[in-house]
């Protein structure tokens, strides 16, 4: 079987059409992939910028820790205020810190 010239002309046109179609499909696929990666990047950025809500047990644990810390600070403050001297010695040595002065005897 031989190929006639008319058949050859039709085949050349079809090959060009098929090449164009394949090129279009390749570019569409790369565009879709680029759009998909851009969408993922946008979602990642949005997730980084938002604060996630804590579940109830986590929030309760953090709240308990915060309350304990506040109670400890308040008890320390109460303890300190109870140890002050009524004579006013505390205010007398208020600006005096150990180690600020050196006594040298010759």
Image (cartoon, grey):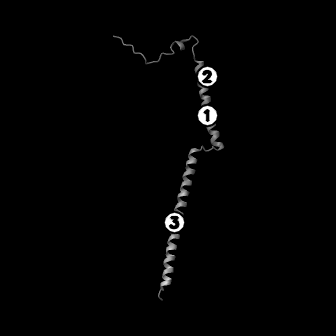
Quote the CA–CA distance across marks 1 and 3. 58 Å
Give the image location of residue 53, x and y in percent.
63, 44
Quote the CA–CA distance across marks 2 and 3. 75 Å
Pointer 1: residues within 10 angstroms few (<14), some, or many (20+)? few
Where 29 sits versus 87, above or below?
A: below
Give the image location of residue 59, x and y in percent.
64, 40
- Residue behind mark 3: 26
Give the image location of residue 30, x and y in percent.
52, 62
Front residue of 23/7: it is 7
User: Residue 78, labelled with which disc?
Assistant: 2
Q: Quadrant of residue 90?
A: top right
User: Residue 29, labelled with which disc?
Assistant: none
Q: Residue at x 56, y 46 (%)?
A: 48
From the viewer's perspective, is the residue at label 1 or at label 2 nearer?
1
Compared across the picture, whether 57 is left or right of 20 comes to right
Pointer 2: residues within 10 angstroms few (<14), some, or many (20+)? few
Q: Residue at x 59, y 27 (%)?
A: 73
Q: Quadrant of residue 57?
A: top right
- Residue behind mark 1: 66
Pointer 3: residues within 10 angstroms few (<14), some, or many (20+)? few
Label 3: state its secondary structure: helix
């Amino acid at each position: 079987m031989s190929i006639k010239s008319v058949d050859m002309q039709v085949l050349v046109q079809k090959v060009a059409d098929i090449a164009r179609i394949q090129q279009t499909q390749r570019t569409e696929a790369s565009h879709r992939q680029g759009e998909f990666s851009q969408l993922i990047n946008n979602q990642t950025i949005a997730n980084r910028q938002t604060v996630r809500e804590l579940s109830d047990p986590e929030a309760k644990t953090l709240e308990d820790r915060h309350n304990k810390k506040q109670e400890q600070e308040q008890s320390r403050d109460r303890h300190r205020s109870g140890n002050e001297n009524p004579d006013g010695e505390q205010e007398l040595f208020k600006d005096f810190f150990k180690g600020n002065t050196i006594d040298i005897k010759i």
